[in-house]
Amino acid sequence: MHASTTQDGAAGRLVTIDAVMQQVAEHKGCGTQGGSGKASCGSAAGQGDLPTEIWEKVKNHPCYSEEAHHHYARMHVAVAPACNIQCNYCNRKYDCANESRPGVVSERLTPEQAARKVLAVASTIPQMTVLGIAGPGDPLANPAKTFKTFELISQTAPDIKLCLSTNGLALPDHVDTIARYNVDHVTITINMVDPEVGAKIYPWVYWNHKRYTGVEAARLLTERQLRGLEMLTERGILCKVNSVMIPGVNDRHLVEVNRAVKSRGAFLHNIMPLISAPEHGTVFGLTGQRGPTAQELKALQDDCEGEMNMMRHCRQCRADAVGLLGEDRSAEFTTEKIMEMEVDYDLEGRQAYQARVEEERVAKVAAKQEELATLAGAQSDITLLVAVATKGSGLINEHFGHAKEFQVYELSTAGAKFVGHRRVDLYCQGGFGDEDSLQTVIRAINDCHAVFVAKIGGCPKADLLGAGIEPVDQYAHEFIEKSAIAWFKGYLGKVAAGELVHTPRGDAAIRQGALIVAA
Ligand code: CLF
Ligand code: SF4
C-alpha cells in the first residue's frame, strides 16, 4: 500500500492522511483552517448584478452557476441510506431520484470513509469545489452521519463548499445545525404546494414515529418544506428548489410552485424531467407515466423564468457522482482505490489552479461580448437552438462520436443562452459508428438547427444533414458562445440574402435513464 500523504497549504508540509484523520478524530483540525478557509479566485467575471456575498457563494459552485459548471466540479458522498418518505418515481434499490437518476446503487460510506474520499478527490481534481450529500436516501433522515461527514470535511478540506439536498420533511428540525456547520447551499425537492397534487406523487411520509398517507401526508410534507425554506433563507443560506416535472400530474402546477418558492426567497429553481421506465421498478415506471419531451420541459422552464433564475444544466447525478456535471469519475474513487491512493491535499496548489480557471473564464466572457457587439443592430426575430459537443472549459472540444451528451444553446440577436443538455448513446464504438446510436442522437437533438463539434466523420455528417441538422466543425477548440454567435450571424446573413429559408424544427426526446460512466 502507498503511503497516503496530504499537504499543509500554509507551510507546504507533507503529512500522512492517517495523521489528518487522527487529528480529526481528536477534534484538532488539520492546521489548514486559517483565514476564511475559502478559495480566492480573484475575478469578478460573470458577477453581473449579484451582491458580492452571493457571488462568493455561487461563483465556483457548478450547480448554482451555469457559467461555473463548465469549469468546476462537484462530488457527492453516499453516506445517507435511509429515507422518511416515498416518492412514486423512486425505487429504493437505487439512489434518491430527487438528485439522482435511477440506474446504479452507490457504494455506501461511513463519514470517515467519506472524508478520506474527499481528500483523495480534492488532491486529484483541483477544480472540485463542492461536496454535496444527496443520498442515496435523504440526508436529513440520517442526520448523525450527514453532519459528522460535514464536520470532518470542514476540518480537513476547509476550501470546499458544503451542499445538502433534502426532501424537506425533516428540514425545520435541522436548520440551526445546517447553519452551525456552514452548509451554505441547500436544495429542497418541492414537487407541489397543493396536497391534492401531492397525494398523486407521495403514497406516504413517516414523521414523528407515525406513517401518514394520502392528502394528509402531502399536506404535512408541503407545510414542512415551505417552513424549512423560509427558515433557511432568513438565515442567509442559499436555497435551490428542485422539482420533478410529471406530465399530467404536476406540470402546470409547477408554475404555482415557482411562485411559492420565489416568494420565500429561493435563489434558483431547477425543474427536472421525470425519468421513468418500467425497468426502474418505480410506481410511475410500472404504470407507464411518461416524462416530458425536451420542448415541454423548455416551455415550462421559460414560463417560470422571471426574476428568479432557472437552473437548466442539472444532470440528475448519482449520490456518489464525482467530476464536472455531465461526467462521472466515481469509478476512479472506489473505497478500495482511495485506500491505495497517494493523497496530496495542496490548498495553495488548488487555489493557484482555480485562479487560472478564472483567467480562462474572463477570456471566454470577453470573447463572447466582443462577438455579440458585432451583432448589435441586427434585426431579426429568428430564434433557434444549436447543440454543442464539449468536454468542458466552455470550448467546442469533443468529437461527435465521443459525445455522451450535447449542450444546447438558444441563439437570437440577444446572443447565445444555455438552455439545456441532452444525454445520448455513444456513437463511436471503438473504430466504427453505431447506426442505432446515431438515430438516438438525432432524436435527442432533433429540435436543433446545427451541431457544433471538434471533429466528425463523413457518415454521421451525411445522416445529420439528411435529418436537417447542420454539422459545424470549423470552430473546433474555440469558445462555444463566441462561435455560436459568429455562426448565427452567418445564418442570418444567408436568410437575408435569400440563400436559406428559416424553418422551425420539431421536438426532441429526452433520453430515459442513460448512464454516464467514466471513460
Ligand atoms: Fe450535489 Fe445538488 Fe449540491 Fe449540486 S448536484 S447536492 S446542488 S453539489 Fe447539481 Fe447534480 Fe443537478 Fe443536483 S447537477 S442533481 S442540482
Ligand atoms: Fe426516494 Fe429520494 Fe423520494 Fe426518498 S426522497 S423516496 S430516496 S426519491
Image (tube, rainbow, N blue to C red):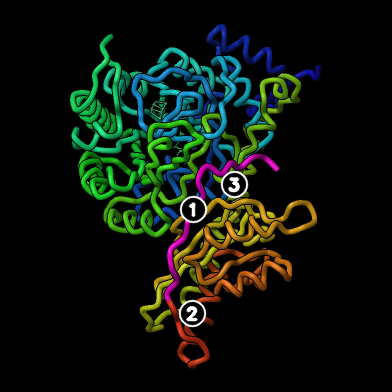
**Residue under label 2:** 374
Residue 398 belongs to the span the image colors magenta = no
Up-down relation of residue 152 to residue 165 (above or below):
above
In the displayed structure, does residue 355 sit left or right of residue 399?
left
Residues under labels 2 and 3: Cα distance? 30 Å
Residue in front for this viewpoint, 339 or 301: 301
Question: Residue 473 location, x and y as percent?
Answer: 66, 70
Q: Residues within 10 Å of mark 2 (few under 14, many from 20)?
A: few
Q: Is the stretch drawn in magenta largely helix, strand or loop?
A: loop
> Can the viewer see residue 56 in this picture?
no
In the displayed structure, does residue 270 sit left or right of residue 471?
left
Q: Which residue lies at the image location 48% right of the left edge and 21% below the top edge?
A: 150
**Residue under label 3:** 355
Disc tally is 3
Q: Amino acid at mark 3?
A: Ala
Residue at mark 1: C-beta within 8 A of ligand 1: no
The magenta span reads 504-519
Residue in front for this viewpoint, 171 or 465: 465
Q: Which residue lies at the image location 43% right of the left edge and 37% below the top edge?
A: 285
Q: Secondary structure at mark 2?
A: loop
Q: Amino acid at mark 2?
A: Thr
In the displayed structure, does residue 105 sit left or right of residue 299?
right
* Lower sequence index among marks 2 and 1: 1
Q: Residue furthest front?
A: 287
The dot on residue 67 is 1
Up-down relation of residue 236 to residue 402 (above or below):
above
Q: Which residue lies at the image location 36% right of the left edge and 51% below the top edge?
A: 310
Up-down relation of residue 411 to residue 35 (above or below):
below
Q: Amino acid at mark 1?
A: Glu
> Can the viewer see residue 138 in this picture?
yes
Question: Residue 293 location, x and y as percent?
Answer: 41, 55
